[in-house]
């Protein structure tokens, strides 16, 4: 019997997938790409759920152990009916991330409408009431993740402006005084060497503060003759000047290999949106698999930091 080769940095939970559409207490096509946080001693996932029209909304799931989740009976965040937001969310709200900041929980999400995708920002204090703050970007832009504290007095966010007219899908960083007006934008991450993310890339999980820098998991996409493959890398950003990349993985550290990651509505996808750092330095990573289910993986924080420095490289930006 052949031995399975695995980098073994990020480990799948043996009970994966932990949430499928059969766990949702109302009819839906699929569930994937969940934000994650801890609130009042409970693990919360904010699930992207797609209905049979192909539109997505967001629903909460709750757990006492971070593994066994119960999905709420009804959606929490539906596409807005507010005249300002409605045209840009008409086709759904997608791919949320949760950032604890200033005693509140800020939620970034993809607003999807007939004119393209934009990054939306909202806030909650109790996971009951949700208030929209802004559509923070123009089209075509998504994968917004907020930093969990202000940097030099300003909010900071990583986004992924989509490629137009042959331009590239890269990560950018941008700043704001109020979560509404954004600017001082600059390219953050250029395509990694090695060819694993040459089609597009974007931030996956909100930054985690470490002594070494801001740790961010990101996804890279490669185009192949059989379709695209979504995989995961990691980078460390300077604490005071996060447009500076201190270290990163020039190779992917997590990619689709299991059947639930290989087969689904969109095959060959692992897409983390949620991450929780436990007191023992364990990272719980919640990811969408094949745009069809939610899975859980774990990693040791120090192992991720070490692999970022494993291959010394200088990232050259355009």
Image (tube, rainbow, N blue to C red):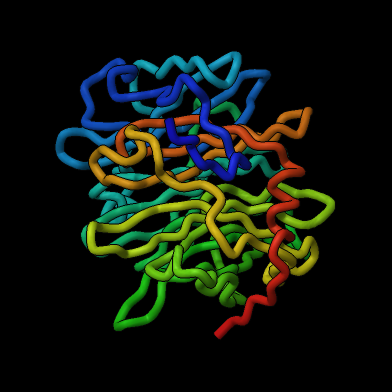
The residue depicted at 29 percent of the width and 24 percent of the height is 21
Displayed quadrant of residue 66 = top right
Q: Give left or right: position of 59 versus 3.
A: left
Look at the image and tell me whether residue 185 can be seen.
yes
Vertical placement of 126 versus 153: above or below?
Answer: above
Task: Identify which residue, 55 or 87, lies in the foreground.
Answer: 55
Quadrant location of the N terminus in the rendered image: top left
Q: Position of residue 230 (x, y in %)?
A: 40, 53
The residue depicted at 65 percent of the width and 51 percent of the height is 207
Displayed quadrant of residue 73 = top left
Residue that protrudes farthest toward the right in the picture? 211
Q: Give left or right: position of 308 versus 161.
A: right
Q: Position of residue 281 (x, y in %)?
A: 76, 34
Q: Give left or right: position of 25 versus 255.
A: left
Q: Give left or right: position of 102 versus 222.
A: right
Task: Identify which residue, 240 or 226, lies in the foreground.
Answer: 226
The residue depicted at 50 percent of the width and 25 percent of the height is 128
The residue depicted at 46 percent of the width and 32 percent of the height is 46
Q: Position of residue 97 (x, y in %)?
A: 51, 44
Residue that protrudes farthest toward the bottom in the picture? 318
Q: Position of residue 30 (x, y in %)?
A: 27, 32
Task: Identify which residue, 113 or 164, lies in the foreground.
Answer: 164
């Amino acid at each position: 019997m052949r031995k399975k080769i695995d980098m073994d940095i990020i480990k799948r939970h043996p009970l994966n997938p932990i949430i499928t559409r059969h766990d949702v207490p109302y009819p839906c096509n699929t569930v994937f790409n969940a934000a994650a946080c801890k609130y009042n001693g409970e693990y919360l996932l904010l699930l992207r759920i797609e209905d049979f029209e192909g539109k997505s909304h967001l629903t909460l799931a709750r757990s006492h152990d971070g593994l066994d989740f119960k999905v709420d009976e009804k959606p929490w965040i539906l596409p807005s009916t507010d005249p300002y937001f409605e045209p840009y969310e008409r086709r759904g709200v997608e791919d949320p991330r949760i950032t604890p900041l200033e005693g509140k929980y800020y939620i970034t999400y993809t607003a999807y409408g007939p004119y393209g995708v934009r990054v939306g920002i909202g806030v909650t204090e109790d996971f009951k009431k949700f208030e929209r703050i802004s559509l923070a970007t123009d089209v075509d832009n998504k994968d917004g993740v907020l930093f969990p504290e202000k940097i030099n007095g300003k909010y900071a966010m990583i986004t992924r402006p989509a490629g137009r007219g042959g331009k590239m899908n890269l990560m950018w960083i941008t700043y704001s005084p109020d979560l509404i007006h954004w600017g001082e934008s600059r390219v953050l991450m250029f395509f990694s060497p090695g060819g694993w993310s040459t089609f597009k890339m974007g931030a996956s999980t909100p930054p985690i503060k470490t002594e070494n820098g801001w740790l961010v998991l990101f996804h890279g996409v490669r185009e192949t003759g059989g379709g695209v493959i979504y995989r995961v890398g990691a980078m460390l950003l300077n604490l005071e000047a996060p447009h500076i990349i201190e270290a990163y993985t020039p190779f992917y550290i997590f990619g689709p290999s299991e059947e639930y990651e290989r087969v689904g509505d969109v095959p060959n996808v692992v897409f983390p949106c949620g991450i929780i750092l436990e007191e023992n330095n364990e990272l719980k990573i919640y990811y969408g698999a094949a745009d069809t289910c939610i899975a859980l993986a774990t990693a040791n924080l120090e192992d991720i930091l070490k692999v970022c420095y494993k291959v010394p490289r200088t990232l050259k930006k355009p």
